[in-house]
Amino acid sequence: MSLRDEVLASQLGRGVRPALQRIGFVQLSLVAMLLLAALSWRTILSSDRLQAAGLFNGETLDRAWRFFQDLAGVHAASPAFLRWSEWQEKAGLAVETLAMSVMGIGIAGGVALALFMFGARNIMLGQLSPYASLPSWGLFALTRGFFTLTRSIPELVWALIIVFAFSPGVLPGAIALGIHNAGVLGRLGSEVVEGLDPRPLRALRSSGAGRLQVLLYGVLPEALPRFVTYLFYRWEVVIRTTVVVGFVAAGGLGTEFRLAMSHFKYTEVTLILFWYLIIVLAVDLAASFLRRLAD
């Protein structure tokens, strides 16, 4: 390589490095996401095992069109969603579903509120814990392990396990929802505590306040508003999960949805979807209003 080529290569390298440095984490993540999406669709469309060609043929479209006609009651003499008695009957199931979501988020909120501060590293092991010891390490590890275990197992799996211990009904579904979301809320609450400004807490500590006083008068008032906000966000998620949990005989609209599909009562399925849409919208509006009050 001549001297001129070496100079050009050096100038090119000096121009490429700043350009690479300007590419941030978000840009790289976007490129990686698009690449993974393209590879995923390539696998779906090219793999014989997935039988992707059957998704786009005329027979599939014809079956889908007939199914939507059944949902709309085109071939039914008296669709369920046009009978007031059916609306009244499904209203009771909608109330059960709503009660399941309230019970579930109540269990989750109570457990997470009692434990989330013990899962914060800065409180148990960091600078705000000058008395860190083996019991502190143990309590921190147990709390984080509980959060990890409960949120890693889906609500449906928890419901399958709990139904064997309880008779089918709303309570097993509420417990399953509460266990899973306790881990989610607990971890979110711990991260809120870890992100607090440590200066007021250090001031309390330096003024002679004990650990319990720091938690009650320093940590809890600062973390509680955001924790309540997360609680209402999770309630919006929980009300959408109640139908899935109901598939395993946990009561509410989910159980009725599974039975209606099994007996090919498609107009009842449509009615259940209407009621489900109503309670989801009601919970969304209520949670938004309560979040504004909490803020």
Image (tube, helix red, strand yellow):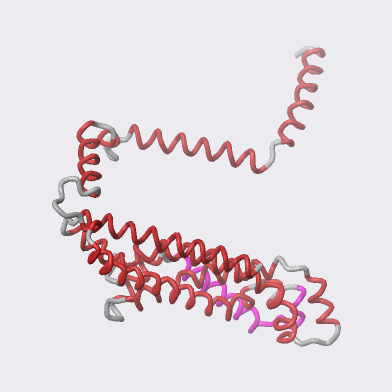
**Left or right of residue 253: residue 293:** right
Q: Considering only vertical position in the picture, is 238 above or below 141? A: above
Image quarter where the C terminus lies is bottom right
Residue drawn at (24%, 56%), measured in percent from left and top?
A: 82
Q: In this view, does 53 lie above or below 79?
A: above
Main secondary structure type of the part rendered in magenta: helix
The reply to whether the magenta stretch includes residue 129 is yes
Q: Residue sitting at 34 percent across and 66 percent down?
A: 245
Above or below, 65 relative to 173: above
- Decide if residue 235 is on the left or right side of residue 45: right
Residue 100 falls in image quadrant = bottom left
Percent x, y for residue 39? 44, 35
Q: Assess whether residue 171 is covered by the magenta stretch.
A: no
Between 45 and 89, the one lying in front of the other is 89
Rendered location of residue 282, percent (x, y): 45, 63
- Can you give x and y, in whole percent of width and height, for residue 142 in the image? 55, 77
Q: The magenta stretch spans which residues?
A: 127-152
52 lies left or right of 70: right
Identity of the residue drawn at 52% across and 36% down? 34
- In which quadrant of the rendered view does residue 240 lie? bottom left
Considering depth in this image, is 140 or 13 the residue closer to the camera? 140
Q: Is residue 2 left or right of residue 231?
A: right
Residue at image coords 82%, 71%: 199
- Provide residue 108's location: percent of width, then percent of height: 49, 75
* Residue 175, quarter of picture: bottom left
